[in-house]
Image (spheres, helix red, strand yellow):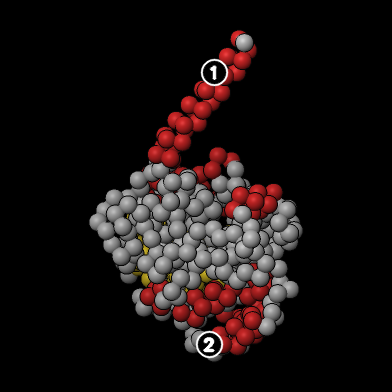
Amino acid sequence: MRVFKFVLAVLLWIVVAFCLAATVLPHFLDRIYYEGPESAHYDGARFFNPDGDDDRLRTPQGSGRFGFLARYLLGNDGRPVWPERVSVRESKPAPRVDGQAMRVTWVGHATLLVQTNGLNILTDPVWSDRAGPLGFGPTRVAAPGIRFDDLPRIDLVLVSHNHYDHMDLATLKRLWLRDRPLIVTSLGNDRVMAGAGVPARALDWGQSLEVRPGMRVAVTRNHHWGSRWFSDRNRALWSSFVVELAGGNFFFSGDTGLGDGKWPAEAAALGPIRLAAIPIGAFRFEEKQMAAGSHVGPLGALHIWQGLGQPQAIPIHWGTFRLSREGYDTPPRLLGAMQRCAGADSRRFAPVAIGRPVEIAPMGSPGPSPDFAKLDACVRAGQFDALR
């Protein structure tokens, strides 16, 4: 009887603890990152995509959410095998690139070093080995293309949103302590970084600030979502950026879906774009999927590229962290196949090697626009189905 009472008491305390956790934890894990007036993309509590939210995880038809997530996390969902590690040839950038010459180095995932006009720019800097909280999350298969200690002094950092594979607080802290750069982000993300002792300037879509005389950075619309925990979803805004420069602007898409497809032209309206960084990976969670709501694949990336005016572009957000189902090099292979189908100039939107500096040519006339009607016909005919 005493054992029975003891077990009953333990079970009772477990139930009480569970009830307390269910009551307290959602409020504890929630964070108020931003408070301000309602707008076309903020309802007074959370941000949203004005072109319609489709950022929730959709499981394949006939698959329960728990079963889908379990199979995905355990890696037994039939996905192609990724390499555990890929070789990377690191480079050591020059301290500065003066004048209107422009040099860019893909560090990996969404991290780029852009050097031009005597300005060193970093996008979504991530040097950590894992992209997730408390030591959990995907492990990078490709080392950073530049050793952190080989980075030149950084002047401007762009942080698109607060997901762990884009906002790496450990890296941001190292950059701030070393270089004191200007860190620009969208509304609410400054509160997240401030908690790690990293000051940032947060702007709304459509706002801009001067970096140096004749150089401005504008925060522009894209289509995504934000969260660091569970119930803090969309408490902070997501964005793309335009850095206005002599010799042509630099556009950084951040992490994005296509949405209404109108926002790239909004960014291009700020001036001719010389270089664009556009994501092509983490778009597939079931067979033959070409986009995932808040992530574009090569098909959506080509639409973004056209909306920007077909500038010189570098595909990013692939081949570093495994976030979805497609194969390691499926995104660039699929991009090339789609460009050939659509008759697009593949030289202007071509993959680059991690760590390899690339010289960006001066502004030039774009080639022929992609034939999207032909491309859609290729998709419907299953011409890309073998690229898993």
Give the residue type at disc 2.
Ser
Q: Is the Cβ of the residue at disc 2 closer than 8 Å to that at disc 1? A: no
Query: What x and y, as percent, mark residue 376?
Result: 59, 83
**Is the residue marked by circle 2 packed among few (<14), some (14-19), or many (20+) residues within 10 Å?**
some
Residue positioned 46% across, 31% down in the render: 19
Image quarter (top left, top right, bottom left or bottom right) of the N terminus: top right
Residue positioned 63% across, 75% down in the render: 335
Judge from the rendering whether residue 31 lies leftward or rightward of residue 304; answer left or right: left
Query: What x and y, as percent, mark residue 340?
Result: 65, 84
The disc at residue 342 is none
Where residue 301 sits, quadrant-wise, is bottom right
The disc at residue 369 is 2
Q: Secondary structure at mark 1?
A: helix
| Direction left: furthest residue | 37
| Direction front: furthest residue | 1
**Is the residue marked by circle 1 packed among few (<14), some (14-19), or many (20+) residues within 10 Å?**
few
Give the residue type at disc 1.
Ala
Q: Secondary structure at mark 2?
A: loop
The disc at residue 9 is 1
For residue 117, above or below residue 88: below
| Direction top: furthest residue | 2
Query: What x and y, as percent, mark residue 150?
Result: 57, 53
Residue positioned 43% across, 51% down in the render: 233
Question: How many callouts does the rendering have?
Answer: 2
Image quarter (top left, top right, bottom left or bottom right) of the C terminus: bottom right
Q: Nearer the viewer, mark 2 or mark 1?
A: 1
For residue 305, above or below residue 154: below
Where residue 61 sits, quadrant-wise, is bottom right
Where residue 151 sits, quadrant-wise, is bottom right
First in sequence: mark 2 or mark 1? Answer: 1
Query: What x and y, as percent, mark residue 42?
Result: 32, 59
User: In this rendering, does residue 349 appear at all?
Assistant: yes
